Amino acid sequence: MRILYISTSFPEPNKGATIYTDLAEVLHESGHEITVAVSEQAKNKKVTGIKLERGFKVLRIATGNYYDVGLIEKGITTLRIPILMKKGISKYLGDCEFDMILFEAPPVTNAGLVAWAKKKFNCPAYLMLKDIFPQNAVDIGIMKNKGLIYRYFTVKERKLYETADYIGCMSKANIEYIIRNNPWLDPNKVELFPNTKKIVSEIPDIKGEMRKRYNIPDNSCVFLFGGNMGKPQYVELLCEAVKSCKNNNNIFFLFVGRGTERYKIEHTIKEFHIKNALVIENLPRDEYEQITRECDVGLVILDPRFTIPNYPSRILSYMEYAKPVLAATDKVSDIKELISEADCGEWVWSGDTEGFIEKIKEMAASNDLSVKGYNGRKYLEKHFRIEDSVEILVNKIKI
């Protein structure tokens, strides 16, 4: 199978990996011909070019700056990406043949680009739906559900779903939401396509390096929050937890990543002279995985106002390294059901600050963390195999 994967984020090998790079690698390793066309931030790459990465072709198309910039620059870049992507694909891949277009959302503004690619290469398109926009922005107060901007993006969202021949959703709750809120949509083209990743075969028993490097007491239960720290992650709840547990010597918070709201945690730590919490910039994948191996509990946080189901991929990393999960989310995301079914941690509504803090203290004193962690690992191996994702895609071409 020959696949053109149109992506908005595909890190170079020396800069780490994601669920998307994992999928592309396993497709390649399974004997399929995959070509990636990715929009590259101008600050990272000034000139468009194609080369072999991870064993297959990756076309990096210089567009504009999208991450860690203001809303105006981000908006301009979002509008320019489809135009510049068409030019790059035409120039470097115009003579190629493909059996499928693979793409993800967000953003919702790539529908025109994908429709053009479908026509040019005469093949179907598979949408990996990772977020539901613009409703997610409405839920957390970034956008109002009326006015020109909202109507503009709802039109783009509908066009996105119309353009895709298949829509893969992260969870059953996602499927139900999409079908219920888009009654015009053919439900037969919506299916389960969960987040999956390459799973390490063994979990090395390495202790001490992280604690020595960051001066973390040996007797502390380390709660790790890894990934983006933006508005959806409801950083305010983490700030309250850090303040409430500042005198608990058996608890340590480790925050790894970037995001527009990260400064709130940094400010809280500084203002309240908190010694048992630390914020670290983005790390190379191997260093982040080392920290995940050595932490005790993985945190997943989502804003309580969400009316759309979310399924953060960071939970997979925690489960991969047999770490129990403490999730504080909205009431519609089915993370709660996952944790209950896998028996791999605890869940609390993120609007219940006191309940969340109590769960932290309970888990810090628990003797069952390793059992919960290995329950999660076993569940991951059974239900989140990346080979299953490859099979779903391949079967679409066989139809």
Image (tube, rainbow, N blue to C red):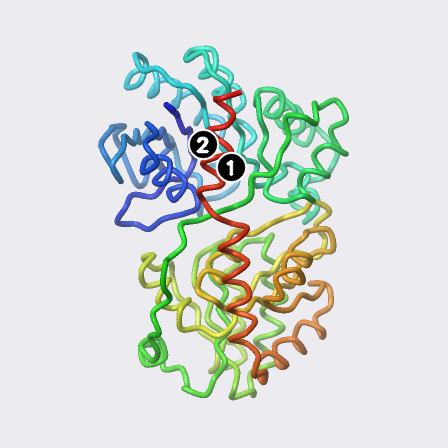
Count neighbours of disc 1 (C-alpha within 10 A) and say few if under 14, some if 14 to 19, many if 20 or more.
few
Vertical position of residue 366 compared to residue 195: above or below: below
Vertical position of residue 337 compared to residue 271: above or below: above
Quadrant containing the N terminus is top left
Give the image location of residue 112, x and y in percent: 52, 19
Give the image location of residue 29, x and y in percent: 31, 38
Give the image location of residue 234, x and y in percent: 62, 59
Q: Answer with the quarter of the image where residue 143 lies.
A: top right
Q: Which mark is residue 77?
A: 2
The residue under the point 45% across, 36% down is: 390
Of residues 68 and 284, the one nearer the viewer is 284
Q: Is residue 42 left or right of residue 233?
A: left
Closer mark to the observer between disc 2 and disc 1: 2
Q: Is residue 114 left or right of residue 343?
A: left
Give the image location of residue 341, x and y in percent: 66, 60
Q: What residue type is labelled 2?
A: Thr
Q: Is mark 1 on a helix, strand or loop?
A: helix
- The single residue placed furthest to the left in the displayed view is 51
Q: Answer with the quarter of the image where residue 38 lies.
A: top left
Q: Which amino acid does label 1 sit on?
A: Ile
